[in-house]
Amino acid sequence: MSDDVILETRDLTKHYGGVHALEGANFILRRGEHVAIMGDNGAGKSTFVRQITGVEQPTRGQIIFDGIPRQFSGPIDAREAGIETVFQTLALADDLDVPDNLFLGREKTLFNLGPFSILDYRAMREATLRGLERTAVKIPNIRNKIRNMSGGQRQCVAIARTATFHSKLTIMDEPTAALGVQETAQVENIIRTLKETGEPLILISHNMRQVFDLVDRIVVFRRGRIVANLNKQETDPQDVVAYITGAKTGAEYQDAA
Ligand SMILES: Nc1ncnc2c1ncn2[C@@H]1O[C@H](COP(=O)(O)OP(=O)(O)OP(=O)(O)O)[C@@H](O)[C@H]1O
């Protein structure tokens, strides 16, 4: 695997009993690259993401992340390796404010005394502000509880979490599906900022305009398999739809490299 590759999967496969949700996925993501994963409902997109983020363990196949073959024992393991995921459900705690959500499970401490530890709220607040600044996210008051925020602000908090921890790879699963026009624009701006700062991204989206606007390459899943790997410059929305629906079936999937 060359150094410019941040993530590679080889023959990645997941069966749920007789359901072949993911079959032999060979996928490559380069450093700094933004790739969209598209496909019809049930095509295997989320299953793919669950394997590479440690939520589930694959039936077979290899995951090589940042040059090392990985067998993530769980999502925290994947996160510690540098993979930050913004799931559809966002996984934010409603009753906590922004810094508490960003540092949930990895709090900064002033000191530890046996089982007791004193949390360093000031350091967490400062790191939160730096994370928000890096992504150009505007949250009026970071001490606000998540439950009092709009959908767009929540989405931004979830994304800012990835920036705060300098993840090596960000994965977003339908980040704007539930958002209005302005909120969607804000999230898309964050994605552009990630691109400018050279941070790689996997974006799962059904939104063709968004995909053509934001990413370099489109990978299409159909019935558990990767059926197309398209450089944005060499394709168009009709072509992508043809692969999604199965009207077009390419030659055997090959890496674009
Ligand atoms: N835990 C599970 N047990 C059994 N079958 C599953 C499980 N998870 C997913 N599947 C099946 O695997 C296939 C792929 O599902 P997956 O959720 O990965 O699709 P998707 O492309 O993400 O779809 P969507 O766009 O609707 O989110 C579907 O047929 C789904 O019913």
Image (tube, grey):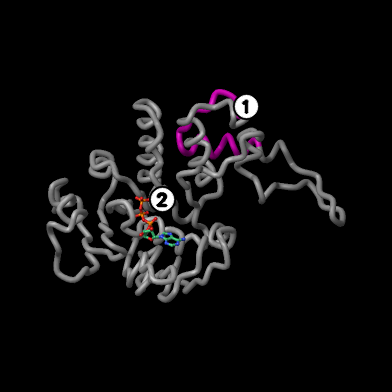
**Residue at 13% across, 57% down:** 247
Up-down: is 136 above or below 113?
Answer: above
The residue carrying pointer 2 sits among few (fewer than 14), some (14 to 19) or many (20 or more) residues within 10 Å by Cα, namely many
127 inside magenta stretch: yes
Give the image location of residue 180, x and y in percent.
37, 27
Asked if residue 228 is positioned above or below residue 93 in the image, the reply reads: below
| Residue 88 is covered by the magenta coloring | no
Give the quadrant of residue 13.
Answer: bottom left
Residue 176 higher or lower than 171, as above or below: above
> SS for tag 1?
loop
Q: Quadrant of ligand 1?
A: bottom left
Q: Name the amino acid, label 1.
A: Asn
Where does residue 232 sit, x and y in percent of width and height? 20, 51
- Under circle 2, the secondary element is loop
Q: Residue at x 26, y 60 (%)?
A: 222
- Segment tinted magenta in the rendering: 125-142
Q: Which residue is mark 1?
A: 144
At which x and y percent is residue 61? 40, 75
Q: How many marks?
A: 2
Q: Which callout, 2 or 1, points to the residue nearer the camera? A: 1
Q: Residue at x 66, y 34 (%)?
A: 95
Please tell me the numbered disc located at residue 199: 2
- Rendering quarter of residue 74: bottom right
Residue ranking furthest to the front: 18
Q: Quadrant of the C terminus?
A: bottom left
The one nearer the camera, 216 or 179, is: 179
* Mark carried by residue 90: none
Left or right of residue 50, residue 29 in this image: left
Tell me if mark 1 has few (under 14), some (14-19) or many (20+) residues whose alpha carbon lies within 10 angstroms of its own. Answer: some
Name the one closer to the observer, 224 or 152: 224
